[in-house]
């Protein structure tokens, strides 16, 4: 373990500690558990014509650097390259994709059910033109719509029943803005997959480090095509009865037997009629839990609810897809603050046991070993946002942590930020990095501050618990604001 300097909070610095999240200044910040998270996206429009099947990677953080295409060669998880390899015609429009590592915490007739001691989060995007519901208890979508680039933004919603502080459960945040992702004005994020990027080598996307395996190595890609371009899809992809299965509501897939092996020719994973849909419907948001054969999805248009669930693990004639709803029966489409006419464009679901085989961390907590979970503050309810994500750089493993936001009373002014860690359940604070000066003129809202923890090889994926803790202090040292503590497992 790296050496840290012990530190104790000075009690005289905290007379103005905020009472809650509502006082947070500057709503144009990216916030929440997935703020700054690495993610893979499909981008429709605004980059290069005809590349909406291209997997584009956003690295850890808020730099605003443009998303980067995955490298050529070694058969990366990129549908555009896979289509070219199989000599598919140009012009096939991909609606959404999933690596099959989404964990769908839905049971029965569409009810969300988070396991005890766990937590889950739904990530989603909306079509350009969404307006949100400003009178909702969740106004974040409406606030983003007013900023003008809602189609290129990503949102996160912590699932009800999650074992996290109640102030963050059921809360919608904008996790990534168009500027955070570095995508052009006028573009839309119409595909999201966070697991693909968690833990990957992000220093160089030009060449993946030889011998490096990401925390989650995809061996399948599930995707849907638009109804308008389904006729362009080769007959062989639709199986023995292409006239029956050809549909924008049929889920296709490719897979491979090794990380450097070629991807198979696309084939049907689940036909429209196996989902209880109509052949003329069109899936445009897709989260596949391949291990459980469960799917959360959305459809183009508003004839059905925008968050639907299907269980493909049962035989027989399928019922119509279920509306995804909270344990109290309320559809989640009514809880996230979208307007009735807002069209969900992409979905991704995550929980702490992604890709796991069971057991305590690390064996049963891959997601928790790559994404930080908010915890309870030392000084009450925190008022500043923080996050943390694993990163691979060459032969090293690191955890990057960020703080975003300002002390709620003094607001956007010059000041300081200090990162700390606590180890295991010991409350002793160790200073992680030197004091950092704040920049009120930072063009990135919230002036994100960052620090990194190098994970010693002996501790990597052992499940050793570390909690990142940030303090934001104004220049006159009259107010100290604690950020949400973020727990990770090394």
Image (cartoon, helix red, strand yellow):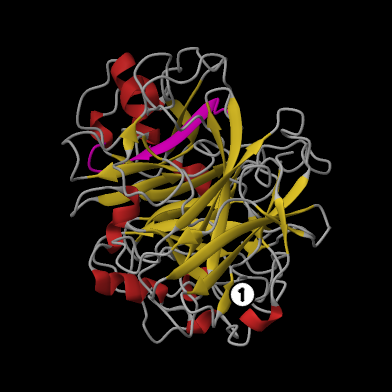
Residue 257, horizontal then vertical, whole percent = 57, 15
Q: Residue at x 50, y 29 (%)?
A: 201
Is there any visible trace of residue 226 in the rendered image? no
Q: What span is in magenta?
A: 217-229
Q: Is residue 460 left or right of residue 473?
A: right
Is there any visible trace of residue 140 in the rendered image? yes
Question: Residue 224 falls in which quadrant of the image?
Answer: top left
Element under disc 1: loop
Query: Quick one: 222 or 482, which is closer to the camera?
Result: 482
Query: Quick one: 130 or 368, which is closer to the camera?
Result: 368
Question: Residue 82 falls in which quadrant of the image?
Answer: top left
> What crowding class fits label 1: few (fewer than 14 Cα within 10 Å), some (14-19), or many (20 or more)?
many
Q: Is residue 404 left or right of residue 418?
A: left
* Residue 232 on the magenta segment: no
Placement of 290 over or under 22, stated as above or below:
above
Placement of 13 over or under 241, stated as above or below:
below
* Residue 227 on the magenta segment: yes
Q: Residue at x 59, y 28 (%)?
A: 396
Q: Give the residue pinned by disc 1.
A: 382
The N terminus: image quadrant: top right
Q: Residue at x 37, y 14 (%)?
A: 73
Residue 399, horizontal then vertical, whole percent = 60, 43
Query: Quick one: 135 or 18, which is closer to the camera?
Result: 18
Residue 377, horizontal then vertical, whole percent = 69, 71
Residue 484, horizontal then vertical, whole percent = 61, 67
């Amino acid at each position: 373990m790296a050496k840290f300097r012990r530190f104790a909070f000075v009690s005289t610095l905290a007379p103005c500690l905020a009472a809650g999240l509502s006082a947070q200044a500057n709503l144009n910040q990216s916030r929440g558990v997935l703020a700054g998270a690495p993610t893979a996206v499909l981008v429709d429009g605004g980059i290069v014509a005809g590349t909406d099947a291209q997997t584009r990677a956003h690295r850890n953080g808020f730099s605003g650097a443009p998303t980067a295409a995955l490298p050529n060669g070694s058969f990366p998880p990129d549908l555009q390259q896979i289509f070219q390899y199989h000599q598919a015609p140009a012009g096939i429009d991909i609606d959404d994709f999933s690596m099959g590592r989404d964990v769908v915490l839905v049971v029965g007739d569409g009810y969300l059910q988070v396991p005890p001691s766990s937590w889950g989060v739904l990530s989603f995007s909306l079509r350009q033109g969404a307006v949100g519901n400003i009178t909702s208890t969740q106004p974040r979508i409406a606030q983003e719509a007013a900023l003008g680039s809602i189609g290129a933004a990503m949102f996160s919603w912590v699932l009800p029943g999650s074992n996290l502080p109640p102030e963050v459960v059921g809360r919608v945040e904008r996790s990534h803005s168009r500027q955070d992702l570095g995508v052009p004005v006028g573009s839309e994020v119409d595909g999201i997959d966070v697991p693909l990027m968690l833990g990957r080598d992000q220093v160089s996307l030009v060449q993946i480090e030889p011998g490096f395996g990401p925390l989650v190595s995809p061996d399948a890609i599930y995707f849907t095509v638009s109804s308008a371009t389904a006729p362009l899809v080769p007959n062989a992809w639709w199986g023995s009865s292409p006239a029956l299965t050809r549909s924008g509501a049929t889920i296709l897939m490719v897979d491979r037997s090794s990380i450097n092996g070629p991807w198979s020719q696309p084939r049907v994973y689940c036909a429209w009629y196996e989902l209880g849909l109509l052949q003329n419907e069109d899936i445009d948001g897709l989260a596949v839990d391949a291990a459980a054969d469960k799917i959360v999805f959305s459809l183009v248009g508003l004839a059905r609810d925008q968050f639907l669930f299907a269980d493909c693990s049962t035989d027989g004639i399928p019922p119509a897809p279920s509306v995804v709803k909270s344990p109290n029966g309320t559809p989640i489409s009514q809880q996230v603050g979208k307007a009735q006419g807002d069209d969900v464009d992409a979905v991704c679901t995550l929980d702490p046991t992604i890709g796991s085989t069971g057991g305590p961390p690390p064996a049963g907590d891959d997601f928790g070993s790559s994404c930080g979970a908010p915890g309870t503050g030392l000084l009450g309810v925190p008022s500043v946002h923080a996050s943390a994500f694993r990163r691979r750089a060459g032969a090293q493993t690191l955890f990057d942590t960020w703080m975003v936001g300002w002390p709620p009373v003094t607001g956007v002014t010059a000041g300081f930020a200090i990162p700390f860690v606590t180890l295991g359940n010991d409350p002793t604070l160790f200073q992680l990095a030197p004091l950092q000066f704040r920049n009120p003129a930072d063009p990135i809202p919230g002036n994100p501050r960052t620090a990194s923890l190098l994970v010693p090889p002996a501790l990597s994926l052992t499940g050793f618990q570390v909690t990142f803790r940030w303090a934001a202090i104004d220049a006159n040292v009259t107010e100290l604001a604690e950020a949400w503590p973020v727990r990770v497992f090394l």
